[in-house]
Amino acid sequence: MTQTYRITLLPGDGIGPEIIAVAVDLLKKVGQQLDLRFEFQEALLGGAAIDATGSPLPADTLELCKNSDAVLLAAIGGYQWDTLPNDQRPERGLLGLRAGLELFANLRPASILPQLVDASSLKREVVDGVDIMVVRELTGGIYFGQPRGIFTSETGERRGVNTMVYTESEVERIGRVAFEAARKRRKQLCSVDKSNVLEVSQLWRDTITKLAADYPDVELTHMYVDNAAMQLLRNPKQFDTIVTGNLFGDILSDAAAMLTGSIGMLPSASLGSSGPGLFEPVHGSAPDIAGQDKANPLAQVLSAAMMLRYGLNEPQAGDRLERAVLKVLDQGYRTGDIMSDGMTLVGCKAMGEALLAALED
Ligand code: IPM
Ligand code: MG
């Protein structure tokens, strides 16, 4: 019997609609090949949702997402919404979705594809062979801590406040995801914090250290976040799996992404303990190139591959998409962000066609 999956698509803003269209075509094709049926339902998120409904996360979007097997998101945000008050911005829609689906674990792999070693801004010998998994806590920390807001004191001075807070159980559940991930990789886990300054980080470190007793096969190290940022640029090959909080993970995952040449290549998976996962590229909505057929759809396609692998447990289908990506790179197709000498510059659509052709065999 044909397996049917209900997928909620969130094209979002900027280049979102262009890149998600590429992934959808590929999913349909891989579905035909492997006898999987995808029922796609599209919903509004971010700026597109603000324009249509006034809210960055309309209630029916969250409902549709909850009632699906997986959610595939492109990207949200854009200049025209940048001046809105913080709680009405597109980003709030994404954060609300992560919280609403309780997606506390964000997996952000950053590995160098041999075809793109020269697209990195770092020297070949530094980045060649890099293969890192950043496990970022996604529904806690300073992104969600209370109190938060901009308050005015009696003297009339304004004060901006956010709170970095983690409970032991929040650290423990992301820690377990990270130890498990490391177990499936090279069995090295580096926990990143700022425990030389922050109490919240001391609790983080204590909790992760305790947890290590359950994973004797995984080698645990700790690193301060400033040093981790430096080490990622100095010697990224020392890292296998990294686990860290929401804000540090946001920053370090961009740095790790850039090792690979372009943030346009990096997928991510956000998972909870049950319910549908959310799969999205690490990059943003790139409003500067939106609608110009210049976007790199590969991170979106690789996010669809992660959806197949981690969200739907269809690793074979995920493999196919990943192989198609490697193949078009082998064939020399490059979008502008990963272009190098001697390669063939293509737009988003042409990259999509090349990927479809690569799926054929
Ligand atoms: C990311 C993004 C988001 C974040 C923004 C868009 C809210 O930078 O997914 O890394 O900070 O988490
Ligand atoms: Mg980010």
Image: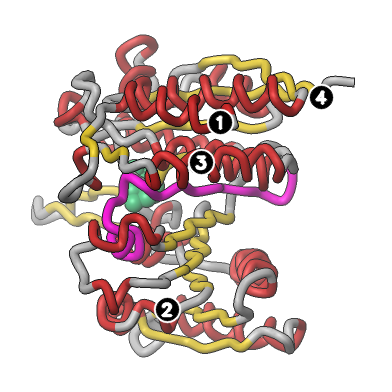
* Mark 1 or mark 2, earlier in chain: 2
Residue at numbered disc 3: 303
- Pair 1/3: label in front: 1
Q: Is residue 157 above or below residue 294?
A: below
Q: Position of residue 274 (x, y in %)?
A: 74, 45
Location of the C terminus by quadrant is: top right
Magenta-tinted stretch:
255-274
Q: Are marks 2 and 3 in contact (CB under 8 Å)?
A: no
Q: Position of residue 94 (x, y in %)?
A: 43, 36
Q: Nearer the viewer, residue 153 or 243?
A: 243
How far is mark 1 from mark 2, CA to CA?
A: 42 Å
Question: What's the amino acid at mark 1?
Answer: Leu
How far is mark 3 from mark 4, CA to CA?
A: 20 Å
How far is mark 1 from mark 3, CA to CA?
A: 16 Å
* Mark 1 or mark 3, earlier in chain: 3
Q: Is residue 228 above or below residue 294?
A: below
Q: Position of residue 219 (x, y in %)?
A: 61, 88
Residue at numbered disc 4: 3
Mark 1 nearby-residue class (10 Å; few <14, some 14–19, many ≥20): many
Residue at numbered disc 2: 193
